[in-house]
Image (cartoon, rainbow, N blue to C red):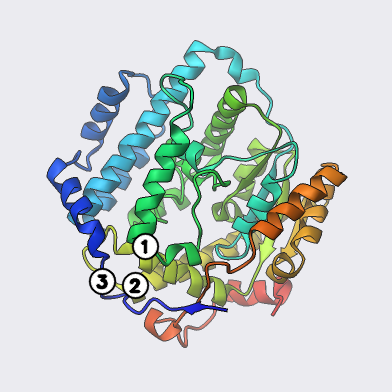
Amino acid sequence: MNWFEVDDLASPRPNPRIEPILRAVLDAGGTPLRPGELLAEAVRQTGLTDFGGEEFRRPLEILCTALRTEAGLSPVGEVSLAAGLVQLLGNRLLVEDLFARHPEIAAVPVDRPIVIAGLPRTGTTHLHRLLAAAPGVRTVPYWESAEPVLATPVHPDPRPERAHRALEFVDLALPHLKRMHELDAREAEEDIRLLAIAFSSTYFECQVPVPAYRDWYLGTDQKPAYAFLRRVLQALTWLRGGGRWVLKAPQHLEQLPALCSVFPDATVVFTHRDPATAVASLSTMAAYSARMIQRVVDVPAIASYWADRIEHLIGRFLADHAAVPAECSVHVPFTEIVTDPLGVAERVLAAAGVPYTAEAKAALDDYVRGHPRDRHGRMRYDTDVLGLTGRRPSAALTAYRARFGEE
């Protein structure tokens, strides 16, 4: 086993090979992090003007203010995040345009999805991508999450290659990231980027801490955002075909009432791991990624932010998990995902009523053999550097360990 440790979390040593690229980004300039300018740029790029409902404008405003005043962004961070917001707004315009031209999409069913809801760093990504290998299952690959609707359909589709090139830069800038969370243009990706088109998503927090936006998100009914997610899934089904959707995002843990309201026939898979391990892993990944967009990487502050967020996720899960009927719930310890992934997949598919045929078993077995755990090496996490050593567990964390602990 090759072990790796990020020894420059607080004082990053950038790869010199990315410096010319970053200079070019700064020289090109960008759109200011203000709603009016971002909206105008999305209109200019797409030639479209209908953003659909107005409910996204308030969170966009709060998010932009938080990014300008709370996030401590570097100049590159300002340009790159603004470009990302413009892309999300463009995606929204394209989704609404597609529905306007093809109103029949609104009748496309999204029946009985399988939803993976677990703390970050609890095996959810591996399980998601494993289930994606099963025949008849539909997931959102990374490239499709980045660009759900193509403005002008062409062949071959340019989106997978665009996403691949973008991820090549990520690997150049953050070579350790694949040891924590491997990104692949064609592999299944979380739905938070689709929820971000509604501007109600933890996607933004995963880029940089934004407390004001977080507080808005946590204090707002997220049913409209989940309804928009369903709308996007309808569009993706109509464009590229469907199947049994498998969704995945940690935020579902704190949005179970909204999730169950929009997807009442969902089978929900809860993954479990000791939260302290999950916090250390997630905090390291967040602090490592922050070097690309923040002026100063305050490692203990980032770790504290995510420790609090994990505790909130756990608290909401404990309060709301009964919203999912017992017959529609599957609880999976992290150790089972590691030691018996095929058994876990079979159990999940059986609970969801998906036939576990010989073809399905062979496809899942091929995936497991082709994606061994820690094939890029394993990361060490230093709780002293993260400022987490000695942190006292909350009541919610203690209750979670008592009920779902595996260690």
Q: Could you say which quadrant of the image residue 260 lies in?
A: top right
Q: Secondary structure at mark 1?
A: loop
Q: Which element type, helix, strand or loop, lies under badge 3?
A: loop
The residue pinned by badge 3 equals 13
Label pair 2/1, CB-CB below 8 angstroms = no
Q: Amino acid at mark 3?
A: Arg
Residue position for label 1? 174
Measured Cα–Cα span from mark 1 to mark 3: 11 Å
SS of the residue under disc 2: helix
| Quadrant housing residue 330 | bottom right
Instruction: Identify the disc placed on residue 301.
Output: 2
Q: Earlier in the sequence, mark 2 or mark 1?
A: 1
Residue 398 sits above or below residue 195 on the image: below
Which class describes the residues within 10 Å of circle 3: few (<14), some (14-19), or many (20+)?
Answer: few
Q: Badge 2, how many Cα within 10 Å: few under 14, some, many 20+?
A: some
Work out whether residue 109 or residue 7 is closer to the camera in this orientation and state it: 7
Q: Nearer the viewer, residue 356 or 19?
A: 19
Counting from the top left corner in percent of width and height, residue 171 is at 39, 58
Which of pointers 2 and 3 lies earlier in the amino acid sequence? 3
In the depicted structure, whether residue 267 falls above or below residue 235: below
